Amino acid sequence: MFNGGNRVPDGAGKGSAIYQGISAIGTALGIGAAILVTPIVFGWTKEPLYSYLSETWRADVSLLLTWAFAAVEAFTIYGSTKLLFTLLTVWSTAALAARRFPGS
């Protein structure tokens, strides 16, 4: 890829290869956690949420909002799992590197 005659390395601006790998693993774990945990959490929240929403709106709108909330739950589980894994892995890698290569 060229930028004004200067060669721009592939992957420039995307972070290091190690961080990209950590991020990819975090994404996979986040998707897995969302697939496995969302039905459990949705089972806990579906009835109370539907009961609360049906007091204000019609049954069909309440059901639609309940399923929309399930999508929000899935995204929240995915995002928090990915963020937690990425932060812990980057922190532990930085800590190991700091021990291995002490500053002068």
Image (cartoon, rainbow, N blue to C red):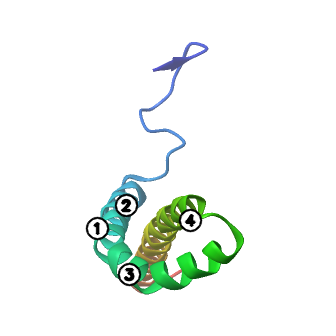
The C terminus, quarter of image: bottom right
Q: Position of residue 85 (x, y in %)?
A: 41, 75
The residue where tag 4 is placed is: 59
Q: Residue 43, which numbered label?
A: 3
Lower sequence index among marks 4 and 2: 2
Label 3 is placed on what type of residue? Answer: Gly
Closer mark to the observer between disc 3 and disc 2: 3
Which residue is at 31% across, 68% downward?
29
Q: Are marks 3 and 4 in contact (CB under 8 Å)?
A: no
Q: On the picture, is 50 further left or further right than 19?
A: right
Disc 3 residue crowd, few under 14, some 14–19, many 20+, Cα 10 Å: few
Q: Distance between the Cα atoms at labels 1 and 2? A: 9 Å
Which residue is at 36% across, 69% downward?
34
Which residue is at 39% across, 54% downward?
20
Which structural element holds mark 4? helix
Q: Nearer the viewer, residue 41 or 10?
A: 41
Q: On the picture, is 64 further left or further right than 22?
A: right
Closer mark to the observer between disc 1 and disc 2: 1
Which structural element holds mark 1? helix
Lower sequence index among marks 1 and 3: 1
Extreme-right residue of the structure? 56
Lower sequence index among marks 3 and 2: 2
Q: Residue 32, which numbered label?
A: 1
Q: Quadrant of residue 1?
A: top left
Q: Nearer the viewer, residue 61 or 81?
A: 61
Q: Distance between the Cα atoms at labels 1 and 3? A: 18 Å
Label 2 is placed on what type of residue? Answer: Thr
The residue where tag 2 is placed is: 27
Position of residue 7 relative to residue 50, above or below, is: above
Which structural element holds mark 2? helix
Label 1 is placed on what type of residue? Answer: Gly
Q: Quadrant of residue 36?
A: bottom left
